[in-house]
Amino acid sequence: MRLKTWIYQHEYTYESFSKEFDFNIRSVEKWCRGERYPSFPAIKKIQTATDGQVKCEDHYNACIAYQNKRDVSTVSK
C-alpha cells in the first residue's frame, strides 16, 4: 500500500502524519507524490507507524512510476 493511500484511509493530512510520526512535511509530500523515496531509517519508521501496511517496495514502485511518467512527458516536449 502506498503511503498516500494509508494517510488518506486513516484520515490524516500530510501535516498531521508528519507531526505525529516526526517527519518533515516536505519529505512526506514528496514521498506521497512519488518524487523521492525515503531513506532506510525513514522506511523502517513508516513501516512501524503503519503497522507494516506500507513497505519499502511500495515507495520504490511509486518512485519508479513517477520517474517513468516524467521521462515520457520530457520526451514529448
Image (cartoon, rainbow, N blue to C red):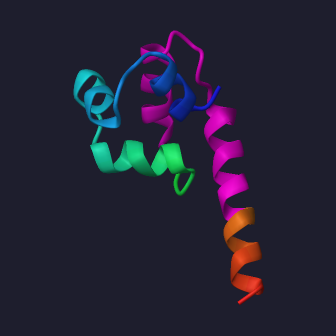
Q: Residue at x 69, y 34 (%)?
A: 57
The residue that appears at 43% across and 34% down in the rendered structure is 42
**In this picture, is 59 found above or below 16?**
below
Kindly tell me whether residue 37 is visible in this rendering.
Answer: no
Is 20 above or below relative to 42?
A: above
**Which one is in front, 73 or 60?**
73
Up the image or down, 55 lies above or below 36; here it is: above
Q: Find residue 33 and report its horizontal and vertical position in percent.
A: 52, 50
Q: Position of residue 1 (x, y in %)?
A: 65, 25
Q: Is residue 39 found inside the magenta-colored segment of the image? A: yes
Q: Which residue range is magenta in the image?
A: 38-67
**Percent x, y of residue 26:** 32, 50
Residue that extends furthest to the bottom in the rendered view of this protein: 77
Q: Give the quarter of the image for residue 2.
A: top right
28 or 47: nearer the eye?
A: 28
Residue 4: % across, % down: 52, 34
Q: Nearer the viewer, residue 70 or 56?
A: 70
